[in-house]
Image (tube, coloured by chain):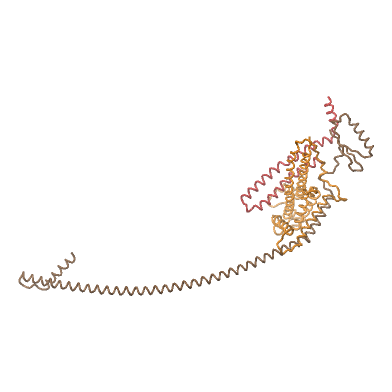
């Protein structure tokens, strides 16, 4: 059991003394009370026991002077911020951001014009390229046409020469065939005259020769 | 074995007056105002046409963080008018939290209930006023207490819950979250600092190297408090924005 | 004999205020311990799910993170109220 003895002088705590009775059991409670009373009279101060140590201020309870100081400083800071510091800083920030935005916009327009220049140049380049290609095409077509014409001419000449040669060939063959047929007919009619004693009719001989030659050709 | 007495809690949280009715908490609050206005004033002295650097960069980063990270995420474009308020709130809370780990201050101002309570009550007044201004008093009460899309019979259950949550729990939890986080951090730092000191000065020589362990924990907790100081300021500003945005446009 | 005498003396000295202090100290411990269970589970689940969502859709990570912090703030408030009750019971 511990007893706190608080000595107070004019409301201020002068001394706090803790006595443990386990080490001091011989002192009876009543005597202790007498002793404290005696001491109180001695020092002329008010002395209280445990129950009154609880009258120490609550650690959580707000103190009015702290409240006033906090409220006052907060309100001062708020008024300064609201009407002077913040608007000025914000204005500066907005002005700078506006400037940056304008710079960005200017850069964007410059970039756009540069891009349009590039596009124009590319268009011109493409046009020139197309023109050159067209010219090359035309030249190539002309050359092709010329070559085709000459080729056709040469081919025509070759064909004409070949058909002339063919005709000559055919005529020569027909002439040769006719000669052969006449000779065969003569020989055949001579042979028949010798065999039957009279001259066969020229027409019959010719037909026979013709048939014989054709069967020979077809065989 | 160890002469370790945890000090009386009020000696960790209550500070003597530096001069009448002006203690460390008030000093921190005033310094928060001075530091944040100095940052912005120095930022304003720089030419705004150039790319921001140094202190102007810092100020603009904070402003853009509030705009993009808090306002746009919760209220959208029409909430941008609240940026100065949320900016003030964020900077004030952050600069009140951070002295918890700064040598010679070693006390977050928000670990005293007065500061978070004031802020939460102010937020409560502001979001209720915004709701009444935007929807009229009847419309605001209707959209708060009778959320649409609930079967009629359930309103017996829903309306008291909504009333308690929107009118009572919100400011309470807002204040307690900030306060308790900062006070818990403060008490943890005190505990580990006391423990390492007691171990380093122990009579038993074998205990002295053991003091390294709470000392490393102290270092770790200090760096953790850096994060907590930022996170609590961010969450407070964020929840303020959520409450105001919800009161202004209930369909969100 | 002496020990019993001491115990009797201690019991005689136990006032109502002492009993209240003892109960307050014990319940302060319980208050914070119990208050930490639910939010502990809740925050673990919340952050785990958020990480899953961010891994699944990295392009939505910013939104998920904002919502995660809000959710942590709401969940954590319960544990902090437990802490405040602890302080109130212990020291007030």
- On screen, residue B195 above or below A83: above
The C terminus of chain B sits in image quarter: bottom right
- On screen, residue C86 above or below A123: above
- For chain C, the rendered hue is red
The answer to whether residue C92 is seen in the rendering is no
Residue B64: percent from the left, percent from the top? 71, 58
> Which residue is at 88% across, 29% downward?
A26
- C1 vs B150, left or right, is right
Residue B48: percent from the left, percent from the top? 73, 63
A161 and B8: which is toward the camera: A161
Residue A43: percent from the left, percent from the top? 94, 38
Residue A80: percent from the left, percent from the top? 79, 59
- B84 vs C9, left or right, is left
- On screen, residue B72 above or below A110: above
* Chain that is brown in the image: A
> Which residue is at 66% across, 51% downward?
C64
* Chain that is orange in the image: B
> Which residue is at 46% across, 72% downward?
A134
B171 and B176: which is toward the camera: B176
Q: Residue furthest front?
A: B205
Q: Residue furthest top?
A: C1
The answer to whether residue B218 is seen in the rendering is yes
The N terminus of chain B sits in image quarter: top right
- B104 vs C38, left or right, is right
């Amino acid at each position: 059991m511990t007893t706190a003895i608080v000595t107070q002088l004019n409301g201020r705590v002068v001394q706090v003394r803790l006595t443990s009775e386990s080490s001091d059991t011989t002192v009876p409670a009543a005597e202790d009370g007498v002793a404290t009373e005696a001491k109180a009279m001695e020092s002329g101060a008010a002395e209280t026991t445990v129950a009154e140590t609880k009258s120490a201020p609550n650690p959580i309870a707000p103190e009015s002077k702290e409240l006033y100081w906090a409220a006052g400083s907060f309100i001062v800071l708020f008024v300064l911020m609201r009407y002077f510091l913040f608007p000025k800083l914000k204005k500066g920030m907005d002005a700078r951001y506006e400037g940056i935005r304008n710079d960005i916009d200017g850069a964007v327009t410059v970039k756009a014009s540069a891009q349009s220049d590039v596009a124009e140049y590319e268009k011109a380049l493409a046009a020139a390229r197309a023109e050159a290609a067209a010219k090359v095409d035309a030249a190539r077509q002309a050359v092709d046409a010329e070559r085709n014409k000459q080729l056709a001419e040469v081919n025509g000449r070759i064909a004409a020469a070949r058909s002339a040669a063919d005709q000559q060939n055919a005529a020569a063959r027909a002439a040769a065939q006719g000669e052969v047929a006449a000779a065969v007919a003569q020989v055949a009619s001579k042979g028949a005259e010798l065999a039957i004693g009279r001259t066969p009719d020229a027409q019959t001989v010719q037909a026979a020769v013709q048939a014989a030659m054709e069967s020979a050709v077809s065989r | 074995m160890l002469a370790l007495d945890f000090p009386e809690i009020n000696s960790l949280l209550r500070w003597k007056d530096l001069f009448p009715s002006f203690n460390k908490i008030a000093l921190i609050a005033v310094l928060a105002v001075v530091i944040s206005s100095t940052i912005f004033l120095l930022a304003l002295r720089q030419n705004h046409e150039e790319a921001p650097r140094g202190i102007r960069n810092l100020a603009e980063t904070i402003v853009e963080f509030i705009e993009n990270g808090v306002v746009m995420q919760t209220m959208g474009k029409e909430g941008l008018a609240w940026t100065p308020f949320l900016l003030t709130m964020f900077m004030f809370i952050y600069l009140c939290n951070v002295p918890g780990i700064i040598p010679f201050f070693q006390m977050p101002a928000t670990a005293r209930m007065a500061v978070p309570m004031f802020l939460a009550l102010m937020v409560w007044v502001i979001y209720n006023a915004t709701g009444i201004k935007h929807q009229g008093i009847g419309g605001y009460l209707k959209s708060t207490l009778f959320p649409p899309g609930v079967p009629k019979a359930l309103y017996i259950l829903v309306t008291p819950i909504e009333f308690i949550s929107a009118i009572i729990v919100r400011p309470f939890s807002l204040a307690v979250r900030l306060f308790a986080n900062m006070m818990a951090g403060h008490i943890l730092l005190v505990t580990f600092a006391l423990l390492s000191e007691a171990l380093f000065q122990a009579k038993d020589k074998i205990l002295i190297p053991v003091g390294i362990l709470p000392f490393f924990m102290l270092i770790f907790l200090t760096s953790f408090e850096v994060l907590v100081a930022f996170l609590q300021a961010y969450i407070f500003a964020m929840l303020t924005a959520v409450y105001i945005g919800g009161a202004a446009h209930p369909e969100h | 004999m002496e020990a019993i005498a001491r115990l009797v003396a201690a019991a005689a000295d136990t006032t109502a205020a002492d009993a209240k202090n003892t109960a307050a100290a014990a319940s302060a411990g319980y208050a914070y311990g119990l208050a930490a269970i639910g939010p502990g589970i809740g925050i673990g689940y919340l952050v785990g799910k958020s990480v899953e969502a961010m891994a699944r859709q990295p392009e939505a990570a910013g939104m998920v993170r904002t919502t995660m912090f809000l959710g942590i703030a709401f969940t954590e408030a319960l544990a902090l109220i437990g802490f405040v009750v602890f302080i109130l019971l212990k020291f007030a």
